[in-house]
Amino acid sequence: MDWFAASDYWLTRLVLQRALAGVYLVAFVSAALQFRALLGEHGLTPVPRFVRRVPFRASPSLFHWRYSDRLFAGVSWCGAALAAAIAAGAADAVPLGAAMAMWALLWLAYLSIVNVGQIWYSFGWESLLLEAGFLGIFLGNDETAPPVLVLWLLRWLAFRLEFGAGLIKWRGDRCWRELTCLDYHHETQPMPGPLSWFFHRLPKPLHRVEVAANHVAQLVVPFGLLMPQPVATYAAAVVIVTQLWLVLSGNFSWLNWLTIVIALAAVDSSAFSGPAPAYPAAPLWYVVLVCAATATVVALSYWPVRNMVSRGQQMNASFNSLHLVNTYGAFGSVTRVRHEIVIEGTDDEQPGEETVWREYGFRGKPGDVRRLPRQFAPYHLRLDWQMWFAALSPAYAAGWFEPFTTRLLEGDRATLRLLRHNPFPEEPPRYVRALLYRYRFTTREERRATGDWWQRTLVREFMPPVRGPGDAEHSR
């Protein structure tokens, strides 16, 4: 079946599969290390409470049948181990059916996590990983040539991902059309990286060039992904370079890295991979499964295509509970001013004007003005991201911020492990409060004079002082 096989793409598949497994590995480790404080039985938004009110059909997950923190940890760490094994080549060392089962287990395990993850898993890159991971099930292994249909489905995913992101910007904030969004974005993005200060301080004409290049990369280049070779390879190269630029300028979890992985499907590696292996004909059952998956994706593509052509285009939306064939896009509006919530505690009996408040430090989000932002992506700091949203509006903090401050007053170990600095290592504070600050990057002159990366100004009180449990047991 010559129409089915793309033997020349064997190296493309090899790199794509190993890299996709690497992204899965990061995702599962992120879940394992952070779930207890966020989603656990005593978490900020507990899974048991969620599954009691949301039916299985709306959010299919194995945790609807049974939940315990031990089971969640087991699923996360087993997923990480399986992803690591596939990244090391295990799926190529077993029969085709077993390899597909390994990829299917990864997808089912992560789907189970995302579908009970609530606000902490509400990001587009979660659905993107599930959609790419679903296609990864059908890519095959060393027993068969890469299937043409799945490579085209991955190209179609890359097109929707990039073109949808470009459309949402062009239709959204006028600063994208005026080429001025990057006058703000490097400073106000959810989690700046170690080079974000330098990107922000580039001359404004270069910011205009950045925005214009982004429009070309997301509104024009994606059509090249669907063209014959070598045009598709050149288009994929532009996407990859653009994504690496974004990696350097900020922290967007595994979004940029996964976009690079998906774009690899359009790369013709035959020029530098040597002769293609002599693959046997693909088993009929495998051909049937690939064709069925292709038909499913084509049918489900109706909703994201309709969304893209709609004036009311949604960003990062899933149209089914399995997160298959989604719509993508981000930053349809760009924040001009950066606000940050700073949480402080005191062990004074009664706070007053002379009270000394000590500040909690977060791993990724700005806090200490002298601390250079760190690079965490592709790892995802879920609490830090939600703190950015909460600073935009208290509505984003509903349901989890008050329990979070309560855990600080209790000295909850799982919660404190999500932070970089706990100013009360011996025992919890008596009171905590939250203040809202305006943050901006220092100028070059301010940086030289003070050594600070940020300058901050108090805006208002976000949450008044809240009293802790007194002499009750503080830690679990």
Image (cartoon, grey):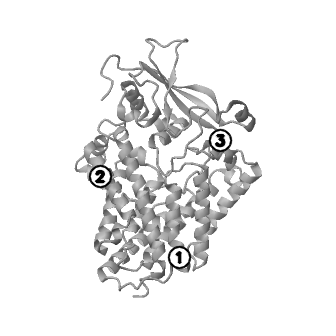
What residue sits right under mark 3 in the picture? 336
Tell me the CA gap for discs 2 and 3. 41 Å
Q: Is residue 171 left or right of residue 39?
A: right
Comparing labels 2 and 3, the label whose residue is closer to the camera: 2
Q: Which residue is mark 1?
A: 269
Report the quarter where the C terminus lies: top left
- Going from the N terminus, do you reach mark 2 or mark 1 first? 2
Q: Residue drawn at (52%, 40%), measured in percent from left and top?
A: 364
Against 42, residue 92 (above or below) is: below
Residue 401 against residue 149 in the figure, above or below: above
Mark number displayed over residue 75: 2
Dot 3, how many residues are within 10 Å of its Cα: few (below 14), some (14-19), or many (20+)?
Answer: some
Q: Are marks 2 and 1 in contact (CB under 8 Å)?
A: no
Residue 402 placement, left or right of 266: left
Residue 198's place in the image compared with 226, above or below, is above
Circle 1: element type: loop
